[in-house]
Structures are given as structure tokens and as C-alpha cells.
Amino acid sequence: MNRLEERIAKDGIVREGNVLKVDSFLNHQIDIQLLDWIGAEFKRRFEGVEVTKILTIEASGIGIACMTARHFGVPVLFAKKTPTINVDEDKYFSEVASFTHQCINHVFVSKKYLSPDDKVLIIDDFLAHGAALNGLTDLVLQAGAQVAGIGIAIEKGFQDGGRIVREKGYQVESLAIVDAMDPKNGTITFHSQK
Ligand code: 5GP
């Protein structure tokens, strides 16, 4: 097991409804040493890939994206969530259905921070059904920029998001892939990693 998998096995809490809580080190209290390892691991896995910007979505992706950006030496841009689309020519908008909150968020970035020259590494904490990634890749493509790759801390491999984004041809690197988790006894099974 890698460092993230070990931490999930030790401190992750499995909830009903296929939700994994990682509030003690990732989603509420944040373990910066672990995030720094995550950033270094993304750098290793995307070695040789040109990246000019990291894009994530508020709020839980921001910490991981920032620690990753230190290793790439590029800025972080985060998509903001808003309940409504206020027609605004200065922004790119997309729609994201929230897995955890069961609602639709409209997300946006300012046009001035994404340009056709950008090679964008998309980073997020979880991959479930792929809605967040779908919205983020849409923002990149609207700008005429390129998706350089996708880095995910925790992929729930038993949900369909990973398959959907990989079928689109993107390089997706998930540092922990959960194959199964059982809310009754709390066990978490990981996909074996390279
Ligand atoms: P997707 O859009 O791929 O369906 O879900 C990804 C988003 O939902 C992530 O940005 C993450 O915030 C949230 N999410 C999905 N599944 C989980 C989960 O099991 N635990 C937590 N903490 N967040 C999740």
C-alpha cells in the first residue's frame, strides 16, 4: 500500500450510500505532509507532461491542488460554485451535479485565467461518477486550452466515473483506487497500484 492508501485504511470512515469520509486528514482537518507527498507523487506520475496551470474545484480540491502546484511550479485556478448562471461574458460556465450534496452547481472560471496556450492538469480529491471532472474538462475546452492530464487522490473504482473519463482518452492518475468498501464492518479494499 502507498502512503495515501495506508492513511485511508487507518482513518477513513465508510458511510452508507457509498460515501468515504476522510475528514481527519483531507476534507476538514488537513495533513499537509500527506498532501505534500500527494503533490510529489502527481509530479512523478506526470513526469515529462507539459503543465502550465492546475485547475480544481472549490472547496476540497484546493488544498491538494496548491500542494501539487508547488511541485510543478505553476499557478492554481479553482472553479467557483454558484447556484445560478448570471450571464457574464467574462466567464466560462459549466454544470456539475454534486455526488455528496445531491444538487446541481453551476461552476465558473474567469476567462482571463484560462487561455488557448494553457496545458491544464486537473486535480480533485475524489472521483465518483465523473460529474466534477466533466465540468472541469468542459471549462478547459471552452477556453480552447488542452487537458494535460487528470490527477485524483481517491477514485471509487466501483463507480463509473473513472471508466468514462479514461474512455475520453485522458491520462488519469488516481493515487488510491477503492475497489470495494463495506459500511457494516468498515473494510476498504484497494486496487493494486504500480
Ligand atoms: P463525481 O463528480 O465524480 O461524481 O464526484 C466527485 C466529487 O464529489 C468530488 O469533488 C468530491 O468532493 C465529492 N465526492 C464524491 N464521492 C465522495 C466520497 O465518497 N467522499 C467524499 N468525501 N467526497 C466525495
Image (cartoon, helix red, strand yellow):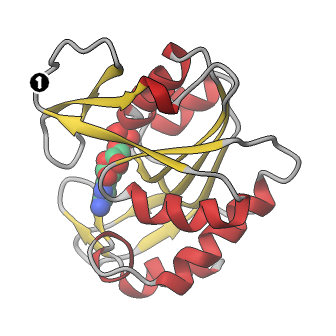
**Residue found at x 31% / y 77%:** 186
In this view, 101 is above or below 92: below
Indicate yes or no: mark 1 CB to ligand 1 under 8 Å.
Answer: no
x 51%, y 58%: residue = 65
Residue at image point 70% right, 37% down: 171
Whether residue 5 appears in this view of the structure is no
User: What is the x, y in percent for residue 148?
Assistant: 70, 35
Spot the residue most to the right. Answer: 48
Looking at the picture, tell me which residue is in the foreground, 194 or 92.
92
**Residue 42 in the image: above or below residue 128:** below
- Element under disc 1: loop
Numbered disc total: 1
State the quadrant of the C terminus. Answer: bottom right
Residue identifier under label 1: 84
Give the percent coordinates (x, y) of residue 85.
16, 19
Q: Is residue 91 above or below residue 154?
A: above
Q: Is residue 85 left or right of residue 125?
A: left
Please tell me in which quadrant of the rendered image residue 107 appears. Answer: top left
Using the image as rendered, state which of residue 99 and residue 95 is in the foreground: 95
The quarter of the picture where the N terminus appears is bottom right
Going by the numbered disc 1, the residue's amino acid type is Thr
Q: Pick the residue in front: 169 or 190.
A: 169
185 on left or right of 63: left
Is 47 positioned to the left or the right of 68 in the image?
right
Left of 113 or right of it: where is 29?
Answer: left
Is the residue marked by circle 1 packed among few (<14), some (14-19), or many (20+) residues within 10 Å? few
Residue drawn where x is 80% and y is 62% of the image: 44
* Residue 8, x across and y down, in percent: 45, 77
Residue 7 visible from this viewpoint: yes
